[in-house]
Image (cartoon, rainbow, N blue to C red):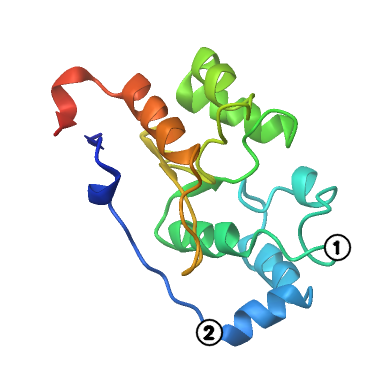
Amino acid sequence: MSVWKDRASWPEVIHTYDPAVRRSYNEGKQLPKWREEYGVCFLFCEQYLSRNLQVPPHKRRGFNELFVGKKYLDAGYDALWACRRGECKTCFQKAGELLGDRTAEQFLISEKDGRPPDVLLFDTHTGRFRFVECKSRNEQFTPKQVPKFTEIENYLVVPDQVKS
């Protein structure tokens, strides 16, 4: 794991999508297709999505996280979207396994000092993980996100792995 303390040097990956996919998601048609396609996995957790009033058909949130998360599923990883305490017990427990219970408690409970990144990606075979923040083209980091993300990185990094 490597850490960049200067957010301008944080790795950036841009995934583009057909606007028709976004329209289909907003209309409540795409999410059921993805859930059927990917089946039982943490990203499309039934326990979370069945009671989430922020995603279609109720509201239109979650597209970026699910779209990017499924790219990682396609690449052979697994992804946790609902890993904050109170969102999904099963997903929070998995985050505790990956991060260690104490770390999960520290970074995935309180939003007072900012939310953790959107998605926690992991390799089921090795247990290696990384956080991913999903932004649309016109979105910026919030004032609390940069210090929060840096705090998480500083806590998780082994000193000889830090890049300046």
Looking at the image, tell me whether mark 2 or mark 1 is earlier in sequence order.
2
Residue at far front of view: 143
Relative to residue 44, is residue 163 depicted above or below? above
The number of callouts visible is 2
Which SS class for mark 2?
loop
For label 1, the SS is loop
- Could you tell me which quadrant the C terminus lies in? top left
Q: In this rendered view, identify the residue nearer to me: 51 or 33.
A: 51
The numbered dot on residue 18 is 2
Q: Give the position of the N terminus as an image quadrant.
A: top left
Where residue 21 sits in the image (x, y, percent)?
Answer: 61, 81
Q: CA distance from mark 2 to mark 1?
A: 22 Å
Q: Which residue is under mark 1?
A: 58
The one of 66 and 93 positioned closer to us in this rendering: 66
Q: How dense is the environment of label 1, judged by Cα within 10 Å: few (below 14), some, or many (20 and up)?
A: few
Residue at 79 percent across and 65 percent down: it is: 56
Query: Could you say which quadrant of the image residue 12 lies in?
Result: bottom left
Q: Amino acid at mark 2?
A: Asp
Residue type at mark 1 is His
Task: Estimate the x, y position of residue 97 in percent, counting from the top left.
Answer: 52, 23
Q: Position of residue 119 (x, y in %)?
A: 52, 46
Q: Residue at x 69, y 63 (%)?
A: 35
